[in-house]
Amino acid sequence: MTPGDTILTLYRRIDAGDFTGARALLAPSFRLTSTVHPEPMDADAWLGALALFDAAFSDVSHGTVVDAENGGEDGSEVRGRFHVSGRHTGHLSIPGLAELAPTGKAFRLPAEPFAARVRNGLVERVRVTMALNGGYKAVLAQLRGEAEPAPLAPAGGEEPAA
């Protein structure tokens, strides 16, 4: 499996709710960083947050696209973008915010560029650059009717900072 295939498999498992299978693809030292999470998240924290998200949304998809892979001595860098979408069918609980009852509404975020490092078949890190109108705040705004879903993304996408 190429590093890009590893990333695609990881997110397919997450989208299917197979968090045990997803965990098997993460290195013990795994860290996720993003513009929404100021502190890096380890595998357990990240998968726990995704499980809460998965419980609140049916048909959730990261819409993962791999744009480039570059190998090196310290692993392979994989760059791509997510096109996250879903339908709000369960209670949404985000720490620090009031629980949101199911609305039945669909959401779609703008493209979110990512860079990941894969070594020996395991994902060591994922960095996500979220748009100003992206992330969980955009999901909440769409569910509350305060914003429209993002338009379908073009084939190209901006690259995250290295």
Image (tube, helix red, strand yellow):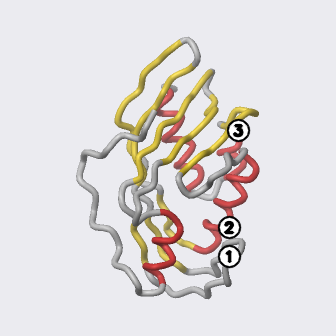
Q: Residue at x 49, y 68 (%)?
A: 59
Label 1 sits on a secondary structure element that is: loop
State the image quarter where residue 125 is shown.
Answer: top right
Q: Give the amino acid at mark 2.
A: Leu
Q: Residues within 10 Å of mark 3 (few under 14, many from 20)?
A: few
> For the point 57% across and 86% down, which residue is it?
102
Residue pointed to by mark 3: 24
* Labels 1 and 2 touching (C-beta < 8 A): yes
User: Where does label 1 land, which residue?
Assistant: 93
23 left or right of 15 in image: right
Q: Assign a secondary structure to mark 2.
A: helix
Residue nearest the viewer, comparing 129 with 21: 129
**What separation in Å lies between label 3 and label 2 (alpha carbons)?**
19 Å
What type is the residue that disc 1 sits on? Ser
> Dot 1: few (<14), some (14–19), or many (≥20) neighbours within 10 Å?
some
- Name the N-terminal-most of marks 1 and 3: 3
Return the x and y of residue 22 as percentages of the image width and height.
65, 45
Secondary structure at numbered mark 3: loop
Badge 3 amino acid = Ala
Which residue, given by chain and number where applicable, does mark 2 sit on? 52
Q: Earlier in the sequence, mark 3 or mark 2?
A: 3
